Image: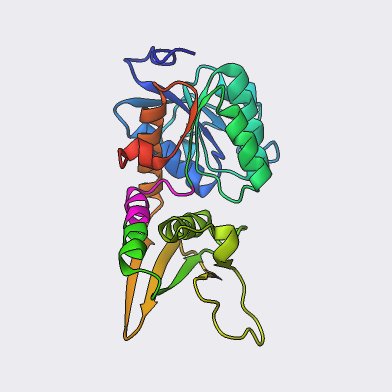
Amino acid sequence: MSAAAGRADGGRIAVAVAGAGGRMGRMLIEAVLGSADCRLSGALDVAASPLVGQDAGAFAGKPTGVAITADVPRGLAGAQVLIDFTRPEGTLAHLAACRELGVRAVIGTTGFTPEQKAAIGAHAQQLAVVLAPNMSVGVNVMLRLVESAARLLGDAYDLEVTEIHHKHKIDAPSGTALALGEALARARGVTLAERGVFARHGHTGERPPGSIGFAALRGGDIIGDHTVLYCGPGERLEITHRSASRANYAEGSLRAARFVAGKSAGLYGMADVLGLG
């Protein structure tokens, strides 16, 4: 599909949304409907969803003429970009269909295994894909800040990552927390596989020098808080991002959709979208 494809409606980018019945899916649909340069071309949900067959904008009292469907090719018909915040297995199935149909993809799903990430990379050899554990502009700026701080402070500071999410989140640590850990590891010239500590229980002994610790909390309807702590001799520095609304993820996703709409095959991140270098 060419960069111009899917723009027959006043030049607007034709966007399909996966997980249309979920909270994030609804937020994405509202963002698309409120955008001047995007239009909703399709809405996907699982076959068991009671919303299949309903108008995708019914929840907001904004009829779209687009029915939610479990038929992936139908949901992607006419789309230029798919935005997907679902689950790893579903995302990979959607991505395979995108590759076949020439639809670019923005993926905000988290919890991928290394093998699943490799499969996304294989698809990206034939398709333009933006993959990011967090679409928030603020979080992506935070990723740069935490890496710079770790490099400036040096090895005398112990590194810890904490994150808090709602009780329904199924993966831990969060994809954003892992991305923060990877940024810290890069600053130290190591890998997260080497230095990450993901659980502490019982008689653990002293903290291993150079380790990067994680703590994951779950409860209520917390959208997502992330903090990186630099614990040094006589002082502690904390860098924190708190999400008060999923709207920032939706707006970041639209920025990613605009970016990827005209891109050739490749795997991109939010640093590319935001021009962070």
Query: Overall secondary structure of the magenta stretch?
Result: helix
Is 138 colored magenta in this rendering? yes
Residue drawn at (56%, 23%) of the image: 76
Q: How far across and down, in percent of the image, does residue 171 sit? A: 61, 58
Whether residue 260 is visible here, answered yes or no, is yes
Residue drawn at (44%, 58%) of the image: 180
Residue drawn at (32%, 86%) of the image: 234
Q: Which residues are magenta?
A: 133-144
User: Residue 255 lies in what quarter of the image?
Assistant: top left
Q: How far across and down, in percent of the image, does residue 114 sit? A: 64, 46
Whether residue 52 is visible here, answered yes or no, is no
Q: How far across and down, in percent of the image, does residue 43 sit? A: 54, 31
User: Residue 169 lies in what quarter of the image?
Assistant: bottom right
- Observer-nearest residue: 193 or 50? 193
Is 80 colored magenta in this rendering? no
- Observer-nearest residue: 78 or 197? 197
Residue that extends furthest to the right in the rendered view of this protein: 48
**Residue 233 to residue 189: above or below:** below
Side of 233 where 200 appears, left or right: right
**Residue 204 to residue 145: above or below:** below
